[in-house]
Amino acid sequence: MVVGAHYDHLGVDELLVGDQIYNGADDNASGVVAVLQLAKAFAVSGEKPLRSIIFAFFDGEEINYLGSEYFIANFQQPQAIKSYINIDMIGREGLLPEMYPKFKIPEATIENTATGKQFHLAYTEELSTKGEQASQDITKHHLDIIVKPSVIAHKSRGTDALSFSLRTIPVAWFFTGLHPDYHTPIDEVSTLDLDKVTDITQSAYLFLRSLAN
C-alpha cells in the first residue's frame, strides 16, 4: 500500500503586488500533515497490518506529477503495489473537477461541490466497496464529516494519483475541492477548517487500515 501527499507548491511570484508568497496551506500542507499523522497513528498503535504501507511525500506535483512519476517508474516491483491513497487539499470546501479525459473545471452544482463538512472521496471502480464502507465508518466513529463518493476512470488527471492509475493501480483521493483561493497567495493556514482536516485524516486512517488488512 502507498499513501501519499505532495509537498511542493508554486513558490514566489515577484510580479504580484502585495503578498507574493504562495503558502499552499490547503494545497497541499493539509495533505502532508494528514500523511504525517497517519504514519504516527500506525506507529503509536503498534498494529502491523497484513500489507506493508509506504508513506510517501512527493515533490513536483505542480509540474506534471514529476515526483510521483519518478517514484513509480523506479519502483522495483510496481505490480506489488495493490492501491494508492492520495491526500491532496482536505482543508476547505469546493468543487470536484472533471478529470478524464482532460482536466477541466465545470459549472458548480450541488452534486459536484462539497460544502460545510462534506468532502469528496474519488476512487477507481476496484475500490467501490471500500468507498461505500467509508461512509459507514464515519458514522460508526462519530466523525463530523460527510463523504461525497464518486467513481473515477483510470488515467484521471489532477493529482499524483495519475502516476499510479496509468499503471492500472487502484487509487482513491481524499479531497475537499477546488476553491477561489486555489493557486493564489490567499491559500493560508487561517483559511483552513482544522477540525475538518482532523476528521478526514481519521477517515483516511480507517480506509487505509481496512485496505492494508
Image: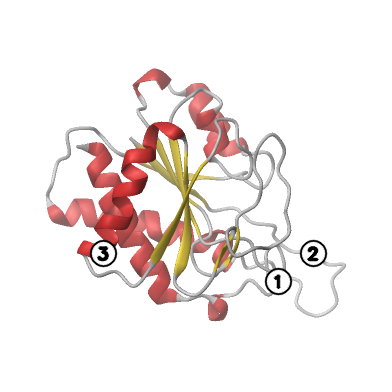
Name the quadrant of the N terminus: top left
Distance from disc 2 to disc 1, alpha carbons, whole Å, reads 9 Å
Q: Quadrant of residue 210?
A: top left
The amino acid marked with disc number 2 is Asp
Label 3: which residue?
139
The amino acid marked with disc number 1 is Pro
Distance from disc 3 to disc 1, alpha carbons, whole Å, reads 36 Å
Label 1: which residue?
185
Q: Residue furthest front?
A: 110
**What number of labels is visible?**
3
- Select label 2 or label 1 by which is in front: 1
Q: Nearer the viewer, residue 72 or 83?
A: 83
Residue 70, image x, y percentages: 56, 30
Residue drawn 73% across the image and 59% down it = 107
Which mark is on residue 25? none
Label 2: which residue?
13
Q: Secondary structure at mark 3?
A: helix
- Tell me if 104 is positioned left or right of 14 in this view: left
- Select label 3 or label 1 by which is in front: 3
Residue drawn 34% across the image and 67% down it = 199
Residue drawn 41% across the image and 68% down it = 197
* Tag 3 near tag 2, CB within 8 Å: no
Task: Give the mark nearest the N terminus, 3 or 1.
Answer: 3
* Tag 2 near tag 1, CB within 8 Å: yes
